[in-house]
Amino acid sequence: MAQPSTSSAVTPTARVIAIANQKGGVGKTTTAINLATALAATRRNVLIIDLDPQGNASTGLGIDRASRATNIYHVLMGEASLSDTAITTDIPGLTVVPSGVDLSGAEIELIDFDRREHRLRDALAGSLESFDYVLIDCPPSLNLLTLNALVGADAVLVPLQCEFFALEGISHLVKTIERVRQAFNPGLVLQGIILTMFDKRNNLSDQVAADVRDFFGDKVYNTVIPRNVRVSEAPSHGKPVLLYDMKCSGSEAYLHLASEVLKRERDLRT
């Protein structure tokens, strides 16, 4: 497999961010792919770990099935390292550790492993010198795979769809983050909440956005990701929307989001 690229911008320790929400269809994978692409465009070296058995992040970055024979499943099982499975994408500075169908059974297999909650964290240790950021695309459930992501991460970024039940769902995730912090990873923080699939023609989107901002305050990013057909089309072409249509509203939103993420990261480190 190709090795990750390096540059003078590389930092000694990568910042690991889990992109999580137990609800499906909220834009986790879309956010992982396009935020990673936008960060790579700023000359950061970025690694995406596709921890979802559906493998949509791998597909959305144009990684064919044949290239996924060795994947994150084998890393979790201790059969391969991250460097063994890392694939350099066509996007400069962006590398992916793909998912595979094997991952569907990983949760059951991991039950009998020692340190089963720490498998990803242990794999990350000493493997991130070439990267500035690692984004983990989590599955749409609070299972052992997601727990591994939260134990291995420095922070959690939550995409939140602007719909009626949004706040109800996120409360469970926030409680899980707190439990993980207390039991396994005391440094874990909620890095931010991203409002996704915002429809400015729909009053409900405005109301949900207002409710989320009232509840979470400055944890909510100013940038909102709009509903945009080009964002929906891009994965079928194996491209981030930033490459598929640079000028669409979705691309512009993810560029703004990357700028906000970098600013928030700088503030956290100072």
Image (cartoon, rainbow, N blue to C red):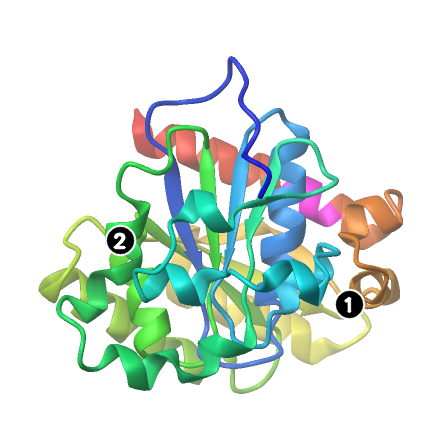
Camera-side residue of 116 and 84: 84
Question: Residue 90 location in percent, x, y?
Answer: 75, 40
Question: Residue 121 location in percent, x, y?
Answer: 26, 53
From this view, report whether residue 133 is shown above or below residue 184: above
For residue 250, what is the image quadrant? bottom right
Q: Can you tell which of label 1 and label 2 is closer to the viewer?
A: 2
Q: Which residue is drawn at 35% across and 60% down?
A: 79
* Amino acid beneath label 2: Arg
Residue 139 seen by the camera? yes
Q: Main secondary structure of the magenta part?
A: helix
Question: Residue 213 location in percent, x, y?
Answer: 48, 62
Outermost residue toward the top in this view: 8
* Amino acid beneath label 1: Arg
For residue 190, what is the image quadrant? bottom left
Whether residue 256 appears in magenta in the rendering, the answer is yes
Write down the region rendered in magenta: 253-257
Whether residue 10 appears in magenta in the rendering, the answer is no
Residue indicated by mark 2: 121
**Element marked by disc 1:** loop
Label number found at residue 227: 1
